[in-house]
């Protein structure tokens, strides 16, 4: 294998998804030499519901990173949630709105913002392993070892590495910081489609016993279609995602007519297992910060992963600045404390919802609740959409 000599930066950000792009932008604006590494080349597709909730959009606007997204996305005015035979619609309050845009375009816009801020983008470069050093403070991360598309190896060295490499984070898994929980093991199958009838300015979540279907209107009359269902991973249906998605849409009475003419514009992508837990007693080594899905992912149903990702990227960047100015003492503890303060209530809420949709009794109870007390369900939908955070 051929090899390039090492390159040295102030910060290496691994993963140029929303979390990494935000972290790189904040740090490059602070005048640091930032390398933003991604194994993909941008623009690149990413299986997602393609929606930014009002809370996520508010973070990007505050950071001055939303102008391209605002110019090209579709305005989302609220969410519609259905159970068996019951529909509840919640409009976002106080003139708030979310946005929908294929992740291919959304993420590319955020990467452009990072590059415009001065970050050096190295796409087509895969991080293989953290570079570890033994120091007086114990094991520390000194950068990452990478390979490019030709297989050439190179080391990227920095006093701070940010792992923003998503749910299957190479760095977090290699260091024993993250793992897939034994349960739930859900998989997502989704794609973009044309000719879906009855789209509106509302995102849709159709919750059924054992699975759910997300639909989001996209610009140019298109739609994001995604089904999430349990699997151990080995089942044959996942080998035929086109059929699996088409069958799920066709077998749902509320959607059948609306999907009669739908055309998938690309073969559906498959992703799973979805949930990633932080390993509770594993200490993040000095030299490393973890952000976005790499720091844990609960479930796509609440549509707020991007809010955690962009705010988490910003918090990691602020911690990196502190580590570079004052050393690592207390950096992880205070990042942990801020993340708990800002995220923990929502993590609890999301785990409760995840448990609810995973049980037949839970879905039945929620459906009944929606019939008798739709106002409570509306409040829950607004909470899931982080409206309270966008309003501040
Ligand atoms: C089915 C589904 C639907 C969802 N719908 C929504 C939604 O509608 N709204 C919402 O807010 N959230 C949604 N989410 C959650 C959202 O997609 C994630 O929370 C978000 O993408 C996290 O951003 P990130 O930057 O942490 O990671 P990612 O977006 O996953 O980005 C990680 C980046 O790291 C790169 N990478 C990975 N490994 C390496 C490596 N070894 N070396 C170099 N680069 C690497 C990848 O190429 C990628 O570009 C959904 C998730 C799923 C699974």
Image (spheres, rainbow, N blue to C red):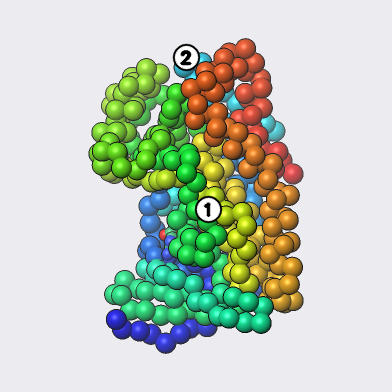
Viewer-side label of 1, 2: 1
- The tag on residue 85 is 2
Q: Quadrant of residue 63?
A: bottom right
Q: Which one is in front, 49 or 186?
A: 186
Residue 207 shows in the view: yes
Image check: 194 left or right of 373? Answer: left
Q: What residue does disc 1 label?
A: 293
The response on whether ligand 1 sits within 8 Å of label 1 is: yes
Q: Position of residue 124 (x, y in %)?
A: 37, 68
- Indicate whether 2 appears above or below 191: below
Tell me the element at label 2: loop
- The residue drawn where x is 31% and y is 42% is 234
Q: Position of residue 368 (x, y in %)?
A: 57, 14
Tell me if mark 1 has few (under 14), some (14-19) or many (20+) residues whose alpha carbon lies within 10 angstroms of its own: many
Side of 345 relative to 215 (left or right)? right
Q: Which residue corresponds to the image point at 73% horizontal and 72% vertical from the top-left? A: 329
Q: Going by the picture, which residue comes out furthest to the top?
A: 372
Q: Are marks 1 and 2 in contact (CB under 8 Å)?
A: no
Mark 1 vs 2, N-terminal side? 2
């Amino acid at each position: 294998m051929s090899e390039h000599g090492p390159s040295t930066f102030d910060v290496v950000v691994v993963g140029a998804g929303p979390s990494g792009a935000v972290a790189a932008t904040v740090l490059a604006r602070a005048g640091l030499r930032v390398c933003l590494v991604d194994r993909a080349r941008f623009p690149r597709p990413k299986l997602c519901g393609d929606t930014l909730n009002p809370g996520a959009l508010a973070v990007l606007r505050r950071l001055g990173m939303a102008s391209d997204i605002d110019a090209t996305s579709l305005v989302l005015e609220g969410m519609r949630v259905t159970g068996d035979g019951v529909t509840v619609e919640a409009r976002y309050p106080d003139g708030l709105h979310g946005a929908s845009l294929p992740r291919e375009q959304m993420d590319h816009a955020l990467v452009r913002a990072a590059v415009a801020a001065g970050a050096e983008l190295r796409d087509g470069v895969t991080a293989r392993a953290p570079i570890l050093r033994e120091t007086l403070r114990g094991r520390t991360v000194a950068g990452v070892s990478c390979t490019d598309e030709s297989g050439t190896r190179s080391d990227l060295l920095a006093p701070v590495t940010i792992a923003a490499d998503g749910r299957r984070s190479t760095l977090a898994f290699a260091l024993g910081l993250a793992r897939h929980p034994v349960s739930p093991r859900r998989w997502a199958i989704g794609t973009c489609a044309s000719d879906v009838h009855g789209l509106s300015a509302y995102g849709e979540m159709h919750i059924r016993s054992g699975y759910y279907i997300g639909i989001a209107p996209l610009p140019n009359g298109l739609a994001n279609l995604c089904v999430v269902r349990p699997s151990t991973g080995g089942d044959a249906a996942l080998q035929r995602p086109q059929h699996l998605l088409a069958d799920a849409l066709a077998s749902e009475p509320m959607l059948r007519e609306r999907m009669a003419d739908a055309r998938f514009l690309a073969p559906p992508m498959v992703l799973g297992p979805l949930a990633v837990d932080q390993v509770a007693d594993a200490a993040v080594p000095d030299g490393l910060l973890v952000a976005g899905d790499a720091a844990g992912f609960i479930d796509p149903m609440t549509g707020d992963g991007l809010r955690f990702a962009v705010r988490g990227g910003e918090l990691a960047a602020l911690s990196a600045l502190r580590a570079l100015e004052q050393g690592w003492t207390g950096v992880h503890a205070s990042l942990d404390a801020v993340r708990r303060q800002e995220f923990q209530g929502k993590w609890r809420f999301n785990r409760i919802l995840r448990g609810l949709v995973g049980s037949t009794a839970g879905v039945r109870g929620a459906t009944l609740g929606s019939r008798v007390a739709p106002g409570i369900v509306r409040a829950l939908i607004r909470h899931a959409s982080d409206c309270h955070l966008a309003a501040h």
